[in-house]
Each structure stands twice: as C-alpha cells, then as structure tokens.
Amino acid sequence: MTAVKAAEVQQEYQEDIADKVDAWLTNKTVSHCIPTKGNENYSDQVFCERGLGELQDLAATAARAAGLEKEAGHIDRCGKSYSVARCNDCGEYIGHPYHCDERLCPTCYYRNLSRFMGRHKKSWEVFTNFTLISVNYGGYRSYDLEEAWVQAYQLHKSLIATFPLLDGGIYHRELKWDEEHHLWNILYHYLLAAHVNYALLFIMALEGQALCESYKSFEGYPAAQSYFIRHCCQYPGDILLDYTKVALYLGLTRQFKLIQGFGLLYRVTGGLNRGSHDRPRRICPICGGKLSHVGLASKEYVFWDDRHKCYHVDPGAPGL
C-alpha cells in the first residue's frame, strides 16, 4: 500500500469508522448472553452469539488503515468464501469453508478459542476444583514493551516450574492498554485444575516480581470455563480496532500462542501425533486421492453433496 493510499484510508477510518468502533467498544460484553439451545460449551455459545459480521468489517478497515492490505483482504473473505482443492486422481473440485486465521480476525479469534476449549473438555471434566488467577507482570511504555513481553514469559515459565505437582491448567496472555497512564499492561490469566489455596502459593512464588490482581475458585468445569471465556478471553478490540496500535500488537504476539495448556494439558493441542499431510482436507472424499489447493471461490459456485458429505465447486468459478 502506497503512503498516499494509506493516508487516505487512515483519514476515512478516523472520520467514518471511529464512531462505529467506539459504539462497539462501549457495548462489548458477553455477560448478557442467554444460553442457546444445543450449545454444550459456553465457548460455543459465545462464538454463536457474538454477531461478528460488523466487527469483522471494522477489523478489516483497521488493518487497511494500518497499511496491512493483504491481511485485510484475508479478513474480508473469511467465512464468506471457500478454499478449493482439485483431486489429482478424479479431477473433482472440493471446497471447504475458508478461514483466514489472521490474528486480527474476530471470527477466527473466537472460532479458534472455541476449538481450543473443546479439545480440553474431556481432560478437564475429571477434575472438581478449579481456580482462576490473574497476574499482572507490569505496565510499560511502548519502547520497553518488546523486552518486557519476553521477560514476562520467562517469569511465567519460572512460576509454573515452581509447582511440579500441579495437575495442569490453561493460561491466556493479554496485552491491555491503559489509556489513563498511557501504559501497556501484560497480564496472564491462569485457569488451574487446583484448589483455591494455589492462589496464595502463586502470590508467594511471585516474590514481588508481579502482582496477583485477582483470584476466584469454581466447582466444576462448566462454571470455570464460562467465567474464563467471559472475562479473560475477549477479543482485544480496544487494540485491534485502533490502526495506530495494530502493528505493535502483531509484532509482539506473532511468535507466541496467546492461549496454551501446561502440565497435564500441555499436549492437548489436537495435532501432536498428526502430520499436516494426514489431515482429512487433503484427501478426496470421492475417490481417496490427494487434493491440491487451487484457489478461492465465492458461495454461489459451491454446492453440497449429501452422498459424499462434502462441498463441490464449479470448475469455472472465478479465481480457479
């Protein structure tokens, strides 16, 4: 994107989009969600009820205003088109719903969060006691943030290593902008399969190097997951919808998973023993041959094959 074009988009963002962003940030909450029939996990409920269409458009606009034209294009097409592969044996064109997996994309953010929590469900249902601990590793100016981000991760690893008998848990990294003091706060939210006494042990182990902001105990996995998703894992719209902060955020988080299991849950990732070439999407559902990616197609060129339980794509679709 040229400097002139970027400046135009940024001006448009400031004049026409800022009010919409402010409105979304003002109303962003999942605390009002009503349980939806058929959604067994709270993470699924959040994903279904967010109404992410407008937010996705805002994220794409912010990406363009930040000069990230390629990423914005991916977000625009996410959930609205199909990734198409051609079978090397029978020649059929097979489609799968396209998901961009861009860190800026709110749809992929909640989709991946839902999938992650779902993968851990069976491992966590055997536990009764859960504790959520939020740790603030400090507030920093922008020029100190990169070094602080790495230091916080090192402190985190030291903290977890202090408790070898801990069954396991999930942690979520959060980068939070403090508008009043103009500081970036680095927070880790730990959802532990452990008694609430571990909150005191965490505070002692931190030895003043970080602040335990809060802790809360739960009985049963559904209540623990619900609170964790609702309060600790929201899409960071105050950052990702502000084009002036997007590049910094992406630069810091690109090499890190924002949510991860540890202890007994470290290996619950869904892909430990599965190679990329073993994925069902690479196998033709018609003849079992190998599929090769050929492009993207819009929905009007895709139709469902109920017999083979797959999407067929018109070979004449634009972009193939």
Image: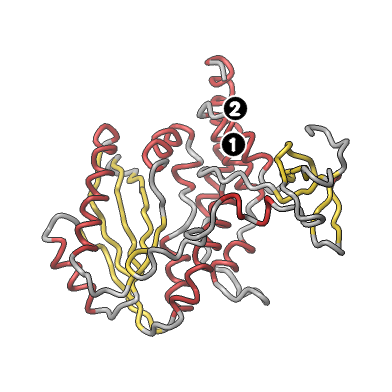
**Is residue 31 toward the left or the right of residue 249 in the image?**
right
Identify the residue at image location x=28%, y=38%. Answer: 145
Count of number-bearing discs? 2
**Is residue 183 toward the left or the right of residue 226 in the image?**
left
Q: Quadrant of residue 267?
A: bottom left
Measured as percent of width and height from the top left, residue 18 is found at 54, 37
Q: Quadrant of residue 204?
A: bottom left
User: Residue tagged by mark 2?
Assistant: 12
For residue 86, the mark is none
Mark 2 Cα within 10 Å, few/some/many (few <14, many 20+)? Answer: some
In the rendered view of the protein, which quadrant contains the C terminus? top right
Measured as percent of width and height from the top left, residue 162 is found at 18, 65
Q: Are marks 2 and 1 in contact (CB under 8 Å)?
A: yes
Identify the residue at image location x=55%, y=21%. Answer: 6
Q: Amino acid at mark 2?
A: Glu
Measured as percent of width and height from the top left, residue 95 is found at 76, 48
User: Residue tagged by mark 1?
Assistant: 17
Q: Is residue 234 above or below residue 166?
A: above
In the rendered view of the protein, which quadrant contains the N terminus? top right
Q: Amino acid at mark 1?
A: Ile
Gap in Å between the C-alphas at discs 2 and 1?
7 Å
Identify the residue at image location x=46%, y=81%. Answer: 125
Q: For numbered disc 1, what is the local secondary structure?
A: helix
Q: Is residue 177 above or below residue 30?
A: above
Q: Earlier in the sequence, mark 2 or mark 1?
A: 2
Mark 1 Cα within 10 Å, few/some/many (few <14, many 20+)? Answer: some
Measured as percent of width and height from the top left, residue 24 is found at 55, 50
Q: For numbered disc 2, what is the local secondary structure?
A: helix
